[in-house]
Structures are given as structure tokens and as C-alpha cells.
Image (spheres, grey):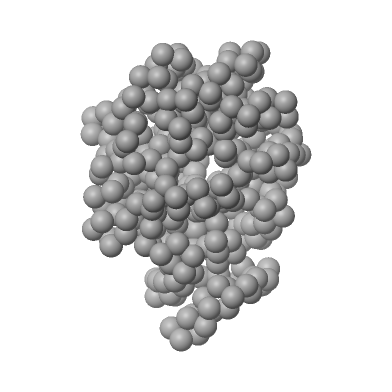
Amino acid sequence: MTPDEMDKFAEDIINGASLSDEDLKKLLAIESEEELEKLYRTARKVRDHFFGNRVFLNCFIYFSTYCKNRCAFCYYNCENDIKRYRLTREDIKETCKVLKGAGFHMIDLTMGEDPYYYDKPERFVELVRTVKEELNLPIMISPGVMNNEILLKARENGADFLALYQETYDRERYAKLRVGQSFEGRVNARRFAKENGYCVEDGLLTGIGNDIESTVLSLRGMKANNPDMVRVMTFIPQEGTPLEGAQQSSNLSELKIIAVQRLFFPDRLIPASLDVEGIDGMVHRLNAGANIVTSILPPNSELDGVANYDRGLKERDRDIKSVISRLESLGMEPASQADFEKVLGH
């Protein structure tokens, strides 16, 4: 496509045009650097129409790395012999103290499916209440598949967003990645949350066993559930997991899918995660059409991320000041809290 044709394509998307499966396949098949740059430029034009140069900032608190699941790709699966932690309520309160006034738009409370909380889910609800009382900010919860009653109680006590990633809508691949877990259970949990006042985030894992057909299937699956945020993350082999020896892909697939997601979900949140390549990687993801920076850690934090590209490094360039500084160098800026409240529909 010529630049003029790409501009017309962006305008069509802005005006409500939807992508067919053939459109998705053609975009996902792009390989040349020149054509990819055209794709990213188009994605940025669509993003800027809806969000301007404003970016949202999400603080990540992985408060428990215990988990009862056996996900083949995850470092924290229950069969991996690793050092784990579980923050106490007082730990959480101390973390909140350093976050006050820092500039975050939302706090992401993430855990594995920790039996400590699953056996007594009121502990989880209390944690949500504590963070809401301490910070009075929107809260995203990423607790795995909790039952509907607990989702309602968490919503009543301050949770605004549910993050629950399918990883793939290819059922055969799903069974290999999320070993022993219900495909429908995750879909239904997001649907229930959406019907009961939550914003919801869905996510894909790319870079292992993906092809264009399965990616299109997954994008269609995501679309059917009307998510408020859609993410894609590159698979990174994790020590001690069944997929430890798998070959790691470049970030090209992730960047391409971010751009396609922007065209397919033009007015939704799309993360630029720090968890795979840090702040330099954030820049690439923003240039591909993302508009919310995720996996920003509290200042001087030793908490884990998910993929943890920086595991073991002394310098972890994942604090909000460093993020804002880099945004400004790109001509971008943090959005206002009012902007984010509009996204939430509040």
C-alpha cells in the first residue's frame, strides 16, 4: 500500500470500518521492514485519533507468586522449584505509601492462583479493600479464575478491572499451555465480570507455535467478548518449566500483533509492557500503537514481574520516573486521571 492508501485505510478504521479475516491475514503476513513501518504508522494514526499523545500508566504489584496451576509457559507454575513470596497486608500498606501521588492511573494486583487466597477468598477481598482505601485509585485484579461470588465482592470493595488472559483461542494449543484448566471457565469469568460492571482485559501469548490462522482465530475470539483492554506478550522460555528449552522468538510478532490489534480494536487500551524488554521495548510497543504502559514497578521494588527479562539484574529500569522521562523524549505525556476515568466509563 502507498502512504496515501494507508492514510485512507486509517480513516476508514476511524470511521467504523471493520477488518475481515482476509484483511487480518494480509496484515499479519507483512514481513518487509518498509511495509511494517507503514503498518505501525497507520496504527499510530488510529491511536492518536482516539487518545492523542496521552499515555496511561499502570503500577504492577505481584503480591503472591504461589500458584496451584501447571501452566507450561509460566515460571511460577506449582511444579517449578523456585523461591516464592506472599506479601502480607502490612507489606501491601507499606507499598501503597510509596505509591501515593506517584502518578499512576491504576494499580494492578496480580497473583498466581494461590491456595492461601482460594481457600479463604475473603483475604483477597480484604486486600482489594485495603488498596482502595489507601490510594483511592482504580484497581485491576489479576487473580486467575475466581468464582462469581468473589468477583462480585471484589467489585463491591473497589476492583474496577479484571485481567484474565486466554493466551490463545486455539483449543489444542490452549490445552498444551494452560495444562488442566477449563477453556470455557476463563471465557465465562470474563463475561460474568463484564456483565457485572468490570472492565476486562484479555491477552494472547505469541512466539510459540503461533501461525497466522491461529492468531486470526484468537483475535476473533477476543473480539466476541468485547474487552476493554487487549494485550499480546512474547513468549520467553522460563527456567524449570516444560517449555524451558523452546526457542525464543524476536519481538517482531508481538509488535505486528499490537499494530493489528490497534486497527481491530481502535479505541481500546493496548499495553506496552515493560516485562519483556524494559523501557527500550516500551518505545517499540508505543510506536506500534500501544497506549498504556504496564508492569511499572513501585520505586526501589524487588517484586517480581511475569516474564522478568531483568531477573537477577541489579539495575531494573522499571520505575515511573524513568518511564515518564522516556515518554517525554518521544513527545508523549501521561494522561490525566480524568482521561482514565472516561476510559473506565466512570
Q: Can residue 23 be seen in this view?
A: no
Relative to 345, say whether 33 is above or below: below
Q: Quadrant of residue 162?
A: top right
Instruction: Give the percent coordinates (x, y) of residue 235.
Output: 49, 44
Q: Nearer the viewer, residue 284 or 156?
A: 156
Q: Can residue 159 be seen in this view?
A: yes
Q: Quadrant of residue 103?
A: top left
Q: Which residue is drawn at 26% across and 52% down?
A: 326
> How many numbered discs?
0
172 vs 94, left or right, is: right
Relative to 137, say whether 331 is above or below: below
95 vs 24, left or right, is: left
Q: Which of 16 and 70 is in front in this view?
A: 16
Q: Which residue is drawn at 65% across and 60% down?
A: 216
Instruction: Give the percent coordinates (x, y) of residue 183.
Output: 73, 39
Q: Which residue is drawn at 56% across and 47% down?
A: 346
Instruction: Give the percent coordinates (x, y) of residue 270.
Output: 50, 53
Q: Residue at x 42, y 30 (%)?
A: 135
329 vs 11, left or right, is: left
Q: In which quarter of the image is residue 82?
A: top left
Q: Nearer the viewer, residue 244 or 115?
A: 115
Instruction: Give the percent coordinates (x, y) of residue 269.
Output: 51, 53
